[in-house]
Amino acid sequence: MTAKQLNYISDFKCDSSKCIQNCCLIYTIRIDKNIVELYKKEKPELLDHVIKEKEDRYIIPSNNNGCSLLKNGLCQIHCDHGEKYLPRVCYTYPRCFYRFNGEIFITSNLLCDHLNNSILTTDNAFDWVGVSIERIPEPLEDSLEGKFNGNKNAELINTSNTFVNSIDDTTFSSEEALIRLILIARLFDKIHISQ
């Protein structure tokens, strides 16, 4: 399966034990049904770490409600069994997946310090690059369904390029680029509120 992702994500590898955020320490990890089925078929011992609440399943939380399978900053599922067995959120985070007019686009959550640093250090950070992916979050609905008329994909790419070009103009100082970014964000916020 192929997707387009922002260039600054291309070399992302979780810093795990070196990460100052360590998101796994504070989030309860939900497990999707297909991973539960995978555990049943191939790794039934992992079911010992899963609890069910109503219709949802979670990794048994630690005392601080984070993941109990995080040891010394390292995920024990990933270390002992491989990324194939990671719950969806663990496999994809901090990547964010969107489907636009049938194509898959990958951006990121800006809570990850490692990726925030990559934005600043990667040449052409906001260029879209083609990538091959093994697994996507399902269901992944079309994010633009009913929101644009005509060629949705072309409008999305045009909006993205306009946005990137407006803050990537080297004739402006970083402060002016930041002001442009804030103004664009406010404009998008007004569009969202009016819909």
Image: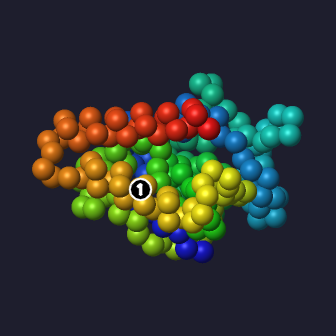
Q: Residue at x 86, y 40 (%)?
A: 55
- Horizontally, is 163 left or right of 150 in the view? left
- Horizontally, is 124 left or right of 3 in the view? left
How many dots with numbers? 1
**Vertical comparison of 117 with 81: above or below:** above
User: Circle 1: is it few (<14), some (14-19), or many (20+) Cα within 10 Å?
Assistant: some
Q: Residue at x 28, y 39 (%)?
A: 180
The spot of residue 145 in percent (x, y) is 67, 55
Q: Nearer the viewer, residue 62 or 189?
A: 189
Residue highlighted by disc 1: 160
Q: Nearer the viewer, residue 154 or 57?
A: 154
Q: What secondary structure is found at the residue carrying circle 1?
A: helix
- Where residue 100 sits, quadrant-wise, is bottom right
The spot of residue 90 in percent (x, y) is 58, 49
Q: Residue at x 58, y 34 (%)?
A: 194
| Three-letter amino acid code of the residue under disc 1 | Ser
- Horizontally, is 144 left or right of 121 in the view? right
- Where residue 13 sits, quadrant-wise, is bottom left
- Horizontally, is 16 left or right of 134 in the view? left
Q: Quadrant of the C terminus?
A: top right
Q: Quadrant of the N terminus?
A: bottom right
Q: Which residue extends farthest right? A: 54
**Vertical comparison of 107 with 58: above or below:** below
- Where residue 97 sits, quadrant-wise, is bottom right
Note whether residue 54 is visible: yes
The spot of residue 151 in percent (x, y) is 57, 66
Q: Residue at x 81, y 58 (%)?
A: 37
**Vertical comparison of 191 with 75: above or below:** above
Q: Nearer the viewer, residue 194 or 64?
A: 194
Q: Nearer the viewer, residue 129 or 160?
A: 160
**Vertical comparison of 63 with 179: above or below:** above
Q: Which residue extends farthest top? A: 64
